[in-house]
Structure formats: C-alpha cells, structure tokens
Amino acid sequence: GLLVFSFHGATAAAQVETNYYSIFGADYSELSQQMAQKGPQGFAGYTASSISYNYRTTPQGASCRIAKVDFDYSLIYTMPKWENAESADPALQGWWQEYYAALWRHEQNHGRIADQRYSAIQRAFSSLGARPPCAEFGPLLREQYTLIDTEFDARQAEYDRETQHGLTEMPSFMGSSVSLNSVNQIPQGSFLQRQWLWLLLGGFVGFVVLKR
C-alpha cells in the first residue's frame, strides 16, 4: 500500500509491497530445496528498503535554510508461495503454516527496523536549522544520512546475529504438533540441520539515492 504523511517542511510517500515467488513440493525436502534455489539471494524470505529524497533551499537573510524535502521510501518483502499446498499431506500443511508465520514475523521485524531508520532520517533532516551558505546542505544531508544508515545497518545485522537469521524463531518438528517423521519420514540428525540452514530466514538490504 501507499502511505503519505508529512512533517514541517517535508512530505513523504511510503510504498510497502509484498512479492511472492512460487514453490512446489510434496514433502519437506522438496520445499526446502525449492526455497534454496528460488529464494532471493538463497534466503526463504527477504526484506529490502530504499530511500530517495529531493530538497529545496531558500535564503533567509544572510543564512540559508531547507524550504522543503520530498522523500520516497519503499519497503519490499519477498516471500515464498507454496502453489500445490492443497494436495499435500495435512501434517506438512500444518508445519508450513507455522513455518510461514515465523518467516513473516522475522521479515516484518526487519521492516520495522527499516521504518525506524526512515523516521530517524526524517527527524534529522527536519531538525537542521539555518546556516550559510546554501551549498552546505548537500554534504550535510549526506553526512546525516550516512551516520544514521550505518547505525541501522548495524541493528539489522545484530538482529540476524541474535536470531541466527531467524533460525532460533523457527518452528521445530520435535517441538511442534508436526512430528519429524510425519513429514515424509525425514530422518533425524545432520540432514535436518542442513535443511534448516537452507531455510535461513532473512536477508536485508537498504540503499539510498540522493537527488538534488
């Protein structure tokens, strides 16, 4: 959806989308392989954001101030869509519902961190006072953005470290209503561990486009 909001001297439009890639499978192994092959950058789910802005300055006596800043912000989620789920074993369907919910929560948490970064950039830009000359504002805005971007990139990375890219948030076969052996008789042990690694949950990428 499109969200439009404003603060003093600025307008902003936020575009939030969820895109899907199709996967097919009749058992856990096939689904995990499909996500490893088709998922963005090898992840099952992915969250990407971008920020661009235009600004206009105006003289104020011997100084200069920002008259207006227009922001464009996009937040794009990419998620798997299991196309032949209805024909699958009910136990596998139950596991998928748990797994997908955990994946979606993980990506939304990345999205919330991206939203926080965007809000921090808006606040930083709106707090800049008058200064001479007008040409100073371009480098100053880039400096402000870089500082905030670095901080929130670190927060994204820390969240993935804490959750092992969402691995700790995943439903477990042994700990859920879906038992390990009910899903196509998958053996326990290292195979399961490798399969989970194929399903690591989230990457995150953010970038900025500066416009004058």
Image (spheres, helix red, strand yellow):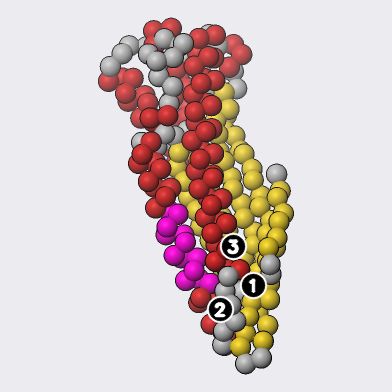
**Mark 2 falls on what kind of element?**
helix
Q: Could you say where residue 143 lies in the image, as x and y percent from the top left?
A: 47, 71
**Mark 3 falls on what kind of element?**
helix
Contact? badges 1 and 2 (CB < 8 Å): yes
Total numbered badges shown on the rendered structure: 3
Q: Nearer the viewer, mark 3 or mark 1?
A: 3
Which residue has dot 1 on it?
55
Which residue has dot 3 on it?
122
* Res 137 label: 2
Q: Could you say where residue 65 lies in the image, as x and y percent from the top left?
A: 63, 80
Span colored in magenta? 141-153
Q: Is residue 150 magenta?
A: yes
Query: Which SS does the magenta portion mostly show?
Result: helix
Query: Badge 2: how crowded within 10 Å, few (<14), some, or many (20+)?
Result: many
Q: Could you say where residue 27 lies in the image, as x and y percent from the top left?
A: 47, 14
Query: Badge 1: how crowded within 10 Å, few (<14), some, or many (20+)?
Result: some
